Image: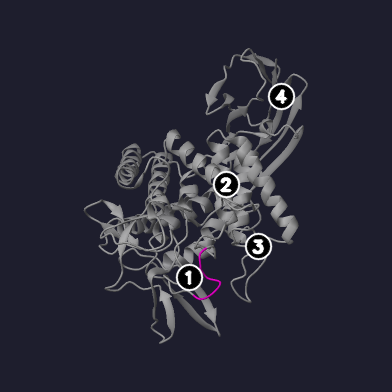
């Protein structure tokens, strides 16, 4: 999990994108399930799966796809496809993971995608008191929306891979499966503003919390999984923005793991690990949520909010001299124990993705930036006059580079890269008129603005990665 999510950042720095995924593939179980950790403990290999988790199979698909984007190794991708398909079949067929009545992925009542279950402490196989990481007769199952938006995203990835291979029928089937899964989820869990946290198979009352109002972290992830309507995406963003206004005054006020949190002691965790409200994943605020929220804000026409989140994150790092996995609602760094680090790889990667894919607007539509969307959104920040951007995968020579500049009455974009096709999605400043002059390499081009939320963009496609685009009014 951490490996896949952080891969969105280390792909720009780390040449080896495949070896860990190769290990997980080799260790895949006969039924299609994956482990979620492996390590060396006193020179002894240790690996396994925390049983309550239901996200590993879609994360393997996402991880393989990200690695392929960075390497461009089609043979390696093809070698992973059977494992990807077996994993999806496990999640959507095994009775522990799949609700046949709702036709949705199920899990015990954890806090969103985390790894301990409601119900107080239990006794672990080693005889020690532990939170409920294991499934047993006391487990209370339900549908957690993030498992299903994540799986729908994985199915969309499989559709893209099939289309690239020329298998139109398989691409259509995967896309239809993703759409059906989301239709099932929307009918069950969408409340008009966001996805309800966990819709239990056998509901019961949890004193001390209004579950109907619980906004959990996978809502922010859903913004970037290509599974939402524009109305849903904007409703989720509006909900986070609204809660910011009613939250304690802190830099990451609305980046909640879950809000409102659960009462103290109901998960059996130790102090520092969600034992009390506002701590760790039980209501602590997390940069990983802020990063996904910022990336989603850029994606869905709320660019100023995206910049606001990135600027607050910069302030947070400056004030605390580092970045932590979680913070208390009033903004204190989350210290869960002596091993706590001030280097939050998961959250900082989410923020980096918001910077590169959101603010800078560079998205790889395939592998090696051969087909790229370039959507500079610097126009939303009046303080930015010029931005020079280069992204390159460490595992290959795939790259994109551009210089964007704000002119007195216009914009200018000079770009180059290793690709074959670039889809330009150029944000216009708020004061720009509809009557624009656009030139590509000096040749006038007719392009009309189109709206995205409250924003306006110009869209055009270039087959030469090296170009100069001038917009004037």
Which tag is nearer the camera, tag 1 or tag 3?
A: 3
Q: CA distance from mark 4 to mark 1?
A: 48 Å
Callout 4 touching callout 3 (CB < 8 Å): no
Q: Nearer the viewer, residue 57 or 312?
A: 312
Crowding at label 3, few (<14), some or many (≥20) Cα neighbours within 10 Å? some
Of the 4 image quadrants, the one containing the C terminus is: top right
Determine the residue positioned at 42% across, 44% down.
194
> Quick one: SS at disc 4?
strand
Q: CA distance from mark 3 to mark 2?
A: 17 Å
Instruction: Name the image quarter holding residue 299.
Output: top right
Crowding at label 1, few (<14), some or many (≥20) Cα neighbours within 10 Å? some
Q: Would residue 4 be found to the left or right of residue 392 on screen?
A: left
Q: Which mark is residue 244?
A: 2
Residue indicated by mark 4 = 411
The correct choice, above or below, for 422 with respect to 139 in the image is above
Q: Nearer the viewer, residue 358 or 439?
A: 358
Q: CA distance from mark 1 to mark 3?
A: 29 Å
Callout 3 touching callout 2 (CB < 8 Å): no
Instruction: Name the image quarter holding residue 296.
Output: top right
Residue 202 x %, y %: 25, 60
Q: Main secondary structure of the magenta part?
A: loop
Upstream in sequence: badge 4 or badge 3: 3
Callout 1 touching callout 3 (CB < 8 Å): no
Upstream in sequence: badge 1 or badge 3: 1
Upstream in sequence: badge 3 or badge 2: 2
Q: Which mark is residue 52?
A: none
Residue indicated by mark 1 = 37
Instruction: Please tell me whether residue 276 belongs to the stretch shown in magenta.
Output: yes
Q: Residue 70, can we see it? A: no
Upstream in sequence: badge 4 or badge 1: 1
Residue indicated by mark 3 = 332
Magenta highlight range: 270-277
């Amino acid at each position: 999990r951490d490996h896949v999510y952080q891969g969105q950042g280390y792909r720009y720095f780390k040449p080896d994108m495949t070896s860990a995924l190769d290990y997980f593939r080799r260790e895949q179980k006969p039924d299609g399930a994956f482990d979620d950790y492996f390590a060396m403990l006193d020179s002894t290999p240790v690996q396994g799966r925390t049983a309550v988790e239901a996200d590993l199979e879609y994360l393997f698909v996402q991880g393989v796809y990200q690695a392929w984007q960075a390497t461009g190794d089609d043979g390696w991708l093809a070698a992973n496809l059977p494992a990807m398909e077996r994993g999806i079949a496990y999640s959507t067929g095994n009775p522990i993971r799949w609700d046949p009545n709702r036709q949705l992925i199920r899990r015990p009542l954890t806090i969103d995608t985390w790894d301990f279950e409601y119900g107080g402490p239990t006794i672990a196989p080693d005889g020690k008191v532990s939170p409920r990481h294991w499934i047993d007769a006391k487990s209370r199952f339900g549908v957690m929306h993030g498992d299903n938006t994540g799986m729908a995203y994985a199915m969309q990835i499989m559709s893209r891979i099939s289309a690239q291979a020329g298998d139109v029928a398989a691409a259509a089937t995967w896309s239809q499966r993703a759409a059906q899964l989301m239709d099932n989820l929307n009918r069950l869990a969408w409340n008009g503003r966001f996805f309800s946290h966990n819709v239990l198979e056998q509901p019961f009352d949890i004193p001390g919390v209004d579950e109907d109002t619980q906004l959990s972290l996978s809502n922010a992830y859903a913004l970037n999984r290509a599974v939402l309507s524009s109305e849903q995406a904007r409703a989720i963003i509006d909900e986070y923005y609204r809660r910011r206004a009613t939250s304690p005054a802190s830099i990451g006020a609305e980046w909640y793991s879950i809000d409102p949190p659960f009462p103290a002691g109901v998960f059996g965790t130790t102090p520092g690990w969600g034992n009390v409200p506002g701590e760790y994943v039980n209501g602590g605020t997390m940069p990983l949520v802020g990063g996904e929220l910022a990336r989603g804000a850029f994606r869905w026409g709320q660019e100023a909010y995206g910049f606001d989140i990135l600027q607050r994150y910069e302030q947070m790092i400056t004030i605390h001299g580092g970045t932590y996995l979680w913070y208390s609602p009033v903004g204190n760094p989350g210290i869960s124990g002596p091993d706590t680090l001030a280097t939050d790889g998961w959250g900082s990667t989410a923020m980096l993705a918001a910077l590169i894919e959101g603010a800078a607007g560079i998205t790889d539509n395939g592998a090696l930036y051969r087909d790229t969307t370039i959507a500079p959104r610097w126009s939303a920040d009046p303080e930015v006059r010029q931005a020079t951007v280069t992204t390159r995968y460490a595992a290959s020579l795939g790259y994109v580079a551009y210089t964007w500049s704000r002119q007195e009455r216009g914009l200018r974009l000079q770009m180059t890269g290793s690709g074959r096709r670039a889809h330009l999605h150029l944000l216009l400043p708020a004061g720009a008129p509809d009557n624009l002059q656009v030139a590509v390499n000096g040749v006038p081009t007719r392009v009309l603005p189109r709206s995205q939320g409250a924003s306006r963009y110009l869209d055009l496609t270039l087959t030469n990665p090296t170009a100069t685009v001038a917009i004037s009014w």
